[in-house]
Image: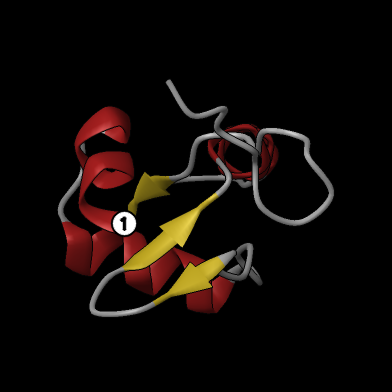
Amino acid sequence: MAEYRWPRGGAPRKPLRAFRELADEFGITMKQLGGLMSQHDGPKPRLRNTNSWYDPAEMRAWWKGIKRD
């Protein structure tokens, strides 16, 4: 059995969440989340491919800090 090595320095990376998953978690639509992120200087994606992937802890901290109507 071959030994698996983590890429880039050997340490596992934190799991990321898709934009849609975070919108579902916060109970709003993707359009609403995108609007809030542009108005309140939201976190930048950690990985961008077909989807944008965000650090969930960073997004939750940002979500707590914004004032919503």
Residue 38 relative to residue 34: left or right = right
Looking at the image, residue 53 lies above or below residue 34: above
The residue depicted at 28 percent of the width and 29 percent of the height is 25
Label 1: which residue? 19
Could you say where residue 28 lies in the image, as x and y percent from the top left? 20, 44
Tell me the quadrant of the picture where the N terminus can be found.
Answer: top left
Circle 1 crowding by C-alpha within 10 Å: few under 14, some 14–19, many from 20: some
Could you say where residue 9 lies in the image, as x and y percent from the top left? 84, 49
Question: Could you tell me the amino acid type at mark 1?
Answer: Phe
Q: Nearer the viewer, residue 56 or 15?
A: 15
Say how many tags the image has: 1
Could you say where residue 64 lies in the image, as x and y percent from the top left? 62, 32
State the image quarter where residue 17 is shown: top left
Secondary element at tag 1: helix
The residue depicted at 67 percent of the width and 33 percent of the height is 12
Looking at the image, residue 47 lies above or below residue 5: below
Looking at the image, residue 53 lies above or below residue 41: above
The residue depicted at 44 percent of the width and 64 percent of the height is 36
Q: Nearer the viewer, residue 51 or 42?
A: 51
Q: How is the image coloured?
A: secondary structure
The residue depicted at 54 percent of the width and 75 percent of the height is 39
Q: Nearer the viewer, residue 6 or 21?
A: 6
Residue projecting furthest to the top: 1
Could you say where residue 15 lies in the image, as x and y percent from the top left? 50, 35
Residue 25 relative to residue 62: left or right = left
State the image quarter where residue 43 is shown: bottom right
Q: Nearer the viewer, residue 66 or 29?
A: 29
State the image quarter where residue 63 is shown: top right
